[in-house]
Image: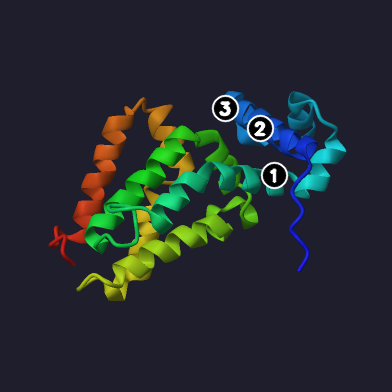
Amino acid sequence: MPEERKPRKDAVRNRAAVFAAADALFTRCASPEEVTMADIAAEAGVGKATLFRAFGDRTGLIRALYEARLEPLREAIEQGPPPLGPTAAPLERLPALLDAVLCFKLDNRHLALALEATGAGSSPYGTEHYERWHTLLRDLLRRIPGLADEADFTAHALLAATRADLVGYLTGERSTPRASLRAHLAAYTTTLLGGRDHEA
């Protein structure tokens, strides 16, 4: 079986430069829609054709950048210890997962807004990343007595509280501090879960 070819050093450098440029542009922009492939190419110092070869289109670039930034969190969820890791009890894991999603969107607000706008009709619900989060939460909710029948809808309701546009509005126009936003989400989650025993 032939060995898997490693990416060329210049390709690795270009990818890192593109991600750094996109990060910077999305952070500085007033609206994610303002950031174009031409802007990112210019900021990264690469040709626009390089971006299209590597990522296909603007949506592909945004998704690749989002996945790269999300990788540490994904590893913690898939392989890490409680409360995020797979061995945690559902009632311990659910609030931790939602807090982690919220913190990620607080730290990557403009990138998350850009990604959520790549769904069908600019809806976040048609994106692959949303389906992954929803499936994870729904499956945990199904393991909690009394919540299994409403697991699908409850997962949607919980994720709605972490939408990037809501996070942006609350932290921007409403000037809600990060700590307050996390506390509000924790209280909302506890209410929806009904204060059940964490051994569930």
What's the residue at 78%, 46% (across, down)?
A: 54
The circle drawn on residue 22 is 2
Left or right for 54, reference 114: right
Left or right for 197, reference 92: left
Q: Amino acid at mark 2?
A: Ala
Which percent across, then down, holds residue 117? 60, 47
C-alpha span from label 3 to label 2: 8 Å
* Quadrant holding the C terminus: bottom left
| Above or below 82: residue 21 | above
Q: Residues within 10 Å of mark 2 (few under 14, many from 20)?
A: many
SS at circle 2: helix
Which mark is first along the chain, 2 or 3?
A: 2
Left or right for 132, reference 81: right
Which mark is first along the chain, 1 or 3?
A: 3
Which percent across, then down, holds residue 74? 46, 52
Q: Amino acid at mark 1?
A: Leu
C-alpha span from label 3 to label 1: 16 Å
Residue named by callout 3: 27
* Quadrant holding the N terminus: bottom right
C-alpha span from label 2 to label 1: 9 Å
Which percent across, then down, holds residue 112? 53, 41
Left or right for 132, reference 11: left
SS at circle 1: helix
What's the residue at 61%, 54% (across, down)?
A: 119
Q: Residue 36: tell me if it is visible.
A: no
Asked which quadrant contains residue 68, the reply is top right
Residue named by callout 1: 61
Q: Amino acid at mark 3?
A: Thr
What's the residue at 62%, 35% (across, down)?
A: 32
Look at the numbered discs 2 and 1 and tell me whether their residues touch, using CB distance below 8 Å: yes
SS at circle 3: helix
